[in-house]
Image: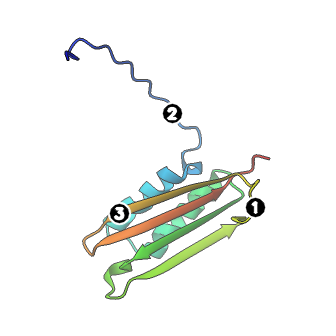
Amino acid sequence: MNYVNRKLNIAITRIANAYRDPNILAEFIAGQLKNRVSFRKAMKKAIELTELAGTKGVQVQIAGRIDGKEIARVEWIREGRVPLQTIRAKIDYCSYTVRTIYGVLGIKVWIFLNKE
């Protein structure tokens, strides 16, 4: 198998509203947490960026040894509407794990988009 002479086309597309994407938002929060920023401050900043991007609602959840505490816990903040029980609702979701010096944290992001 000789794959040396293969041509590969890579197309880079720019996302118009980056903070409407839950993956980008989760990576933003993960970067903040790795830099030892307070988790609540990171969550609020992420929600603020998402609100500016023009979404109807956002929910962010962080679970694990938050701020290096001995006991793991779950913290979440919701802003706007996030109707998780409504099947027709256009909700983007992302689950993201981040390795900090204290251990592994799980980040979940739900974004309610206004596309009906």
Q: CA distance from mark 3 to mark 1?
A: 29 Å
- Residue under the point 48% across and 75% down: 40
Measure how far apart labels 1 and 2 are at the Cα level. Answer: 31 Å
Looking at the rendered structure, the kind of residue marked 3 is Val
Q: Which residue is mark 3?
A: 98
Task: Indicate the position of residue 63 as horizontal and vertical percent values.
Answer: 44, 74
Q: CA distance from mark 2 to mark 3?
A: 25 Å
Residue hosting label 1? 86
Circle 2: residue type: Arg
For the residue marked with disc 1, what is the amino acid?
Thr
Where is residue 27 shown, x and y percent of the image?
A: 42, 55
Q: Residue furthest top?
A: 5
Instruction: Say which mark, if any, is on residue 109.
Output: none
Closer to the observer: label 1 or label 2? 1
Mark 2 / mark 3, whichever is N-terminal:
2
Residue 93 location (% of width, % of height): 57, 56
Q: Secondary structure at mark 3?
A: strand
Q: Is 34 rendered above or below residue 21?
A: below
Picture disc at residue 14: 2
